[in-house]
Image: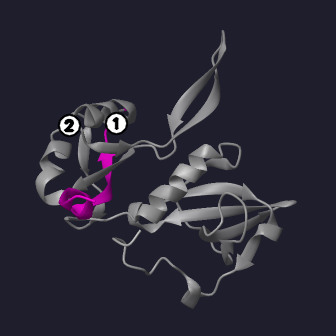
């Protein structure tokens, strides 16, 4: 691991509407590690139906950078508006959260779509399957549960279909979300 690897963390940047793919390409061209989670969906037009890739989080692209030395390169990218954070301090996104997002896009049948609010309900941890270890809040919907995984650092959530037998109740003191975000 180089010194640069130790000082590089994941951040979310907010981008102009419909600029996610362009920003991602431009960041990669600048040799900045960038991640744009995409989901393939079918779009229907009046004359045809086509499979398209759409951002999982509209308006967001993730970057892994050394904030001190690379933030200006990111902000100077056409379409980038700002870093997401609290006040003027960009929020570090844990490696664990990025890994979960990567799992979500590898399991496209489970992802139902983005939601903006964390709904009330039971906090749970997934006990088995590709989402094992993932924490979220449950909303019941027929035979399946809807696990809403809320990524607090970017204030976004994803709704995932999951069978109830794969969920275990989670008490507030058991949550991993209070850990240091730089520990992934």
N-terminal-most mark, 2 or 1: 1
The quadrant of the image that shows the N terminus is: bottom left
Please give the name of the residue rendered at 80% of the width and 67% of the height, measured from the top-left corner. Answer: 164
Q: Is residue 143 left or right of residue 25?
A: right
Q: Can you tell which quarter of the image residue 9 is in?
A: bottom left
Please give the name of the residue rendered at 67% of the width and 57% of the height, measured from the top-left corner. Answer: 130
Crowding around mark 1 (Cα neighbors within 10 Å: few <14, some 14 to 19, many 20+) is many
Circle number at residue 57: none
Q: Residue furthest right?
A: 143
Residue 7, magenta (yes or no): yes
Q: Can you tell which quarter of the image residue 137 is in?
A: bottom right
Using the image as rendered, state which of residue 6 and residue 80 is in the foreground: 6
Residue identified by numbered label 2: 77
Residue 7 picture location, percent across and down: 22, 63
Residue 159 picture location, percent across and down: 63, 56
Region of the chain picked out in magenta, as a range = 1-18
Q: Is residue 83 visible?
A: yes
Please give the name of the residue rendered at 77% of the width and 68% of the height, measured from the top-left corner. Answer: 166
Residue 94 picture location, percent across and down: 40, 65
Q: Is residue 166 above or below residue 11?
A: below
Q: Residue furthest front?
A: 1
Circle number at residue 24: 1
Q: How many marks?
A: 2
Crowding around mark 2 (Cα neighbors within 10 Å: few <14, some 14 to 19, many 20+) is some
The quadrant of the image that shows the C terminus is: bottom left
Residue 116, magenta (yes or no): no
């Amino acid at each position: 691991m180089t010194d640069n690897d130790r000082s590089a963390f994941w951040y979310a940047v907010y981008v102009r509407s419909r600029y996610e793919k362009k920003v991602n390409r431009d960041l990669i061209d600048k040799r900045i590690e960038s991640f744009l989670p995409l989901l393939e969906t079918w779009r229907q037009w009046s004359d045809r139906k086509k499979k398209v890739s759409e951002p999982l989080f509209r308006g967001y692209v993730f970057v892994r950078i050394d904030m001190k030395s690379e933030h200006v390169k990111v902000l100077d990218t056409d379409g980038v508006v700002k870093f997401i954070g609290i006040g003027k301090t960009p929020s570090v996104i844990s490696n664990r959260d990025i890994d979960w997002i990567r799992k979500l896009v590898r399991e496209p049948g489970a992802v139902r779509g983005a939601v903006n609010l964390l709904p009330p309900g039971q906090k749970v941890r997934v006990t088995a399957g590709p989402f094992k270890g993932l924490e979220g809040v449950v909303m019941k919907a027929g035979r399946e549960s809807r696990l809403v995984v809320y990524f607090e650092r970017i204030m976004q959530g994803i709704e995932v279909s999951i069978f109830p037998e794969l969920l275990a109740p989670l008490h507030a003191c058991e949550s991993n979300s209070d850990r240091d975000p730089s520990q992934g």
